[in-house]
Every structure is written in C-alpha cells, then in structure tokens.
Image (cartoon, rainbow, N blue to C red):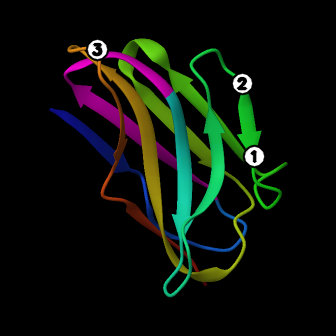
C-alpha cells in the first residue's frame, strides 16, 4: 500500500505565495518522477511541474519564473513553491508519484489534492 498526501493549499491574495508539499509513504522501495498537476472546475487536469529522482525539472509555461519544484528523495517528498500568484478560480493541485514498491512493482499514485484559491 502506498499513500500520497498533499498539503499546504489555501486562500491567498494575488501576489502572495504558497508552498505545497507532497509526501508518499508506505511500501516504497524508491520513488521516481514526482509531479504537480492543477485542475480547475470543468477543465482537464494539467501539468504544472515535475521532477525526476535525479533532479531534472520540467515546468509548464505558466509556471516558469514563478514556481519552483523540489524534492527530498530520502523522505519521498516533493514541494512546489508558488510565488507571485495570480487571481484565478479555485483549483485543486494534485501530486502524482511513480513508485517502485517493495515488491518491485512500478505503479503511479495520485494524492487526493489540495485546493488553492487566489483571491482578494
């Protein structure tokens, strides 16, 4: 069993910052790529940023220059620092983790999401 839990969402004013955390736990031998995705109501889930175990990073154009993704391999945890947040409808941020389990299976796990609202 593997669990993925996001935290750090909330209401923030335009121009403000939030730091999201994603922690994977359970029967994990190693974590692979970890990514943050965003889904607004009525829209498809879209990639915000992802990071490989070796530290290779990919950002969506909308995130470049404002967001920073990082990870702690020892803790199977990823972070998303979001700065200069722009006004937007509420969206849920999801974390996706590729995991090699203790039984040597490679599986993809999603967290339940954390809501982010940028509004004055």
What numbered label is drawn on residue 59? 1
Q: Which residues are magenta?
A: 17-32
Q: Position of residue 105 (x, y in %)?
A: 29, 22
Name the residue rendered at 42%, 29% in the picture: 77
Main secondary structure along the magenta-highlighted residues: strand
Q: Residue at x 42, y 52 (%)?
A: 8
Q: Is residue 58 left or right of residue 88?
A: right
Queried whether the magenta region covers residue 26, the answer comes back as yes
* Residue found at x 49% / y 24%: 32
Q: Quadrant of residue 38?
A: bottom right
Q: CA distance from mark 1 to mark 3?
A: 29 Å
Which residue, given by chain and number where applicable, does mark 2 sit on? 56
Q: Which residue is mark 3?
A: 104
Residue 30 % position (x, y): 38, 15
Circle 2 sits in a helix, a strand or a loop, which is it?
Answer: loop
Can you name the residue that lies furthest to the front here?
A: 105
Of the residues under marks 2 and 3, which one precedes in the sequence?
2
Quick one: quadrant of the N terminus?
top left
* Quarter assignment of residue 94: bottom left
């Amino acid at each position: 069993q593997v669990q993925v839990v996001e935290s750090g969402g909330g209401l923030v004013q335009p121009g403000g910052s939030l730091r999201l955390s994603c922690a994977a736990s359970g029967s994990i031998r190693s974590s692979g790529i970890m990514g943050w995705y965003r889904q607004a109501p009525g829209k498809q889930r879209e990639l915000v940023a992802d990071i490989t175990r070796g530290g290779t990073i990919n950002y969506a154009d909308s995130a470049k220059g404002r967001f920073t993704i990082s990870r702690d391999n020892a803790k199977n945890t990823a972070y998303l620092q979001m700065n200069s947040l722009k006004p937007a409808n509420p969206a849920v941020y999801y974390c996706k983790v590729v995991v090699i389990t203790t039984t040597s299976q490679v599986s993809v796990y999603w967290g339940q999401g954390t809501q982010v609202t940028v509004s004055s």
